[in-house]
Amino acid sequence: MSNTSARLALPLFFLAVLTAFCLAAPNFASAGNFENLMAGFSFIGILAIGQSFPILLRGIDLSVGAILALVGMCIFDLSLMFAVPGWAVIPLALLVGALAGAVNGLLVTVLRLSPFIATLATLAAYRGLVYAISGRQLVPGLSTKPITDRWITGFETYFDLARMLGLKGVVKLPWVPLSFLILLATLAVFYLLLAHSRFGRDLYAIGGNPEAARLAGIPVTRRTVAAYAISGFCAGLAAILLVARLTTSTEALGEGIELTAIAAAVIGGFSLAGGTGQLIGPVIGTFLLGVVLIGLTQMGISQFVQQILTGVILLAAVGNDRWQTSRTERRRTAPALTGGAA
């Protein structure tokens, strides 16, 4: 399979699945349904973008769901317990997410823990910290009080696409949530960072061969910490969007969502072997999962079956990743073997 064919495979498969559900599922091809798809999965797309950075370095971040909950509870506490204005809460929330991600990077680089063990440990630690600082536990009366600060709830805003295109009254188009536009902006910023900066080239080099990158003078430790900090930052941004949608935060916020983010990143072409991937892939992978889950729901398929299917999709994506990696290795070694035989 050529590089061009490989890049087109996922978008074409996404369009095929989307078309199939539009034809098979009742009311799937409706403006309201696409609004729900964009609003319900944009924050997961942002998580998947962040997850791609550790995976690019042959790592993984199992703690993104717990970081999301930690940031969400910080927003809850700052807004409702301490009456901090929303314009100050937002940067503080992003800072908490980035610092939590940086701690993961330090555990991986300084203590030399495996990314799986390090982030599994912080998953438990951050989730416990959420309960420890929970304003819902400390001040039970706040458990039913919504966040009303417009700086925060304003992220749950929708734009009339038909009016923006001058087609109001001509065709019914979905309203576009601000969260989807933030997803596109996040994609653009980190795509440029990864594809057109020295930082991005260093990450690809580290993911391809960490020791060779170190010998070439690349600051592997700093780059790795920065990659995990980006993952935490994206979890913080996703938390802001999710809290704005719910107008509250709970201790269980984001439980299990790390698996969906990892699945989206791997489906999107980020190899667990490191060193490969483009950020548009995880976003397409996110909405592919969204289309499947929403489509199955509208077809009356049980939620348990949906969870099983999500696991099957992840297994298929990982299996394809391993097959592609093995195939690439065989291609690299074949010329050497041929030359040796000659």
Image (cartoon, rainbow, N blue to C red):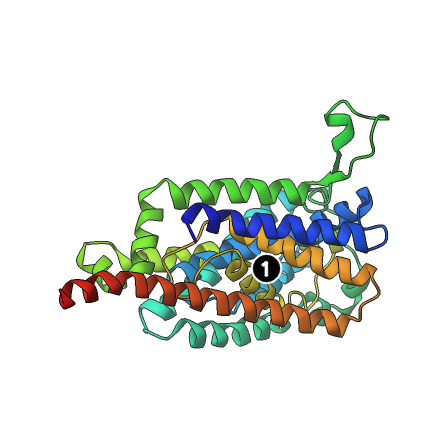
From the image, tell me which residue sits under label 1.
Answer: 71
Could you tell me which residue is drawn at 45 percent across and 49 percent down?
278
Q: Residue furthest front?
A: 342
Q: Residue furthest top?
A: 166
Can residue 237 be spotted in the picture? no
Residue 2 appears at what percent x and percent y?
A: 41, 50
Mark 1, residues whose alpha carbon is within 10 Å: few (<14), some, or many (≥20)?
many
Could you tell me which residue is drawn at 32 percent across and 73 percent down?
112
* Residue 118 horizontal side relative to residue 66, left or right: left
Residue 314 appears at what percent x and percent y?
A: 57, 68
Q: Quadrant of the C terminus?
A: bottom left
Label 1: state its secondary structure.
Answer: helix
From what the image shows, is residue 212 above or below residue 190? Answer: below
From what the image shows, is residue 155 above or below residue 288? Answer: above
Q: Quadrant of residue 261?
A: bottom right
* Residue 289 horizontal side relative to residue 315, left or right: right
From what the image shows, is residue 24 above or below residue 182? Answer: below
Residue 298 appears at what percent x and percent y?
A: 82, 59
Q: Quadrant of the N terminus?
A: bottom left
Can residue 219 be spotted in the picture? yes
The amino acid marked with disc number 1 is: Val
Q: Nearer the viewer, residue 285 or 257?
A: 285
Q: Nearer the viewer, residue 137 or 103?
A: 103
Could you tell me which residue is drawn at 54 percent across and 47 percent down?
91
Q: Quadrant of residue 159?
A: top right
Number of numbered discs visible in the structure rendering? 1
Residue 134 appears at what percent x and percent y?
A: 66, 68
